[in-house]
Image (spheres, rainbow, N blue to C red):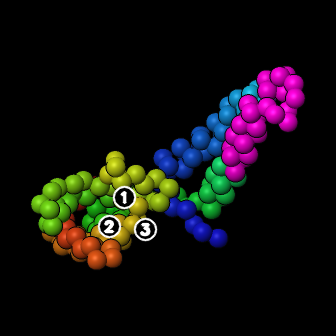
């Protein structure tokens, strides 16, 4: 069984998503199926086929979400004096290209690198784990090497 690490907010968000899929999205698809059936011959009805496919995809997503919630472990934010961990907000300097960035360490489900939410399982998340202000870290992915300096631990 794979543990899914989530913040309390991420867990609640996932529960809301599941509730929405089970109540609202299922009803929308049921309505689409009903309307497509009313058109007659289902063997050549593209709208019916599309609605059945959407229904199957939704049920798979519901199942995945239920499994994730079942195996979720709500993570406590790491205290600032314990080094970088879950919930840490970190300001870094990419030494390789001389750019600053701010990231937050989250579980895999909540990660969104375009918005600064970095998974604890990502190369950057793993390299920062437990580190302190002013430490330097090196990330190597294949032949690509990037160096960072931890400027601040904001949270």
Identify the image quadrant of the N terminus.
bottom right
Q: Which residue is mark 1?
A: 118
Q: 68 left or right of 155?
A: right
Residue at left offset 66%, top offset 39%: 21
Per the image, is 40 magenta?
Answer: yes
Residues packed near mark 3 inside 10 Å, few (<14), some (14 to 19) or many (20 plus):
some
Determine contact: label 1, label 3, CB under 8 Å: no
Per the image, is 127 magenta?
Answer: no
Q: 46 left or right of 81?
A: right
Determine contact: label 2, label 1, CB under 8 Å: yes
Mark 2 and mark 3: span between their CA atoms?
Answer: 8 Å
Badge 1 element = strand
Chain part drawn in magenta: 34-60
Residue 8, percent from left and from top: 50, 51
In this picture, is 75 found above or below 114?
below
**Splitting the image into 4 quarters, where does residue 76 fall?**
bottom left
> Magenta stretch mostly in which secondary structure?
helix
Judged from this view, the residue extending furthest toward the right is 41
Residue 99, percent from left and from top: 15, 57
| Mark linked to residue 124 | 2
Lower sequence index among marks 2 and 1: 1
Residue at left offset 48%, top offset 47%: 9
| Mark linked to residue 90 | none
Q: Which residue is mark 3?
A: 121
Residues packed near mark 2 inside 10 Å, few (<14), some (14 to 19) or many (20 plus):
some
Give whichever of 117, 39 is nearer the camera.
39
Give whichever of 102, 138 is nearer the camera.
138
Residue 80, percent from left and from top: 28, 62
Mark 2 and mark 1: span between their CA atoms?
Answer: 8 Å
Residue 47, percent from left and from top: 73, 31
């Amino acid at each position: 069984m794979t543990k899914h690490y989530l913040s309390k907010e991420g867990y609640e968000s996932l529960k809301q998503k599941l509730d929405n899929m089970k109540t609202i999205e299922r009803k929308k698809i049921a309505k689409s199926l009903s309307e497509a059936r009313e058109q007659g011959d289902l063997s050549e009805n593209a709208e019916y086929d599309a609605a059945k496919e959407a229904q199957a995809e939704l049920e798979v997503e519901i199942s995945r979400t239920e499994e994730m919630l079942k195996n979720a472990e709500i993570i406590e934010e790491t205290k600032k004096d314990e080094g970088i961990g879950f919930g840490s907000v970190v300001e870094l300097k990419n030494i390789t290209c001389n750019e600053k960035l701010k990231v937050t360490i989250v579980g895999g489900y909540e990660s969104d690198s375009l918005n600064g939410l970095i998974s604890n399982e990502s190369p950057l998340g793993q390299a920062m784990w437990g580190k302190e202000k002013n430490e330097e870290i090196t990330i190597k992915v294949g032949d690509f090497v990037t160096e960072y300096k931890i400027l601040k631990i904001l949270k």
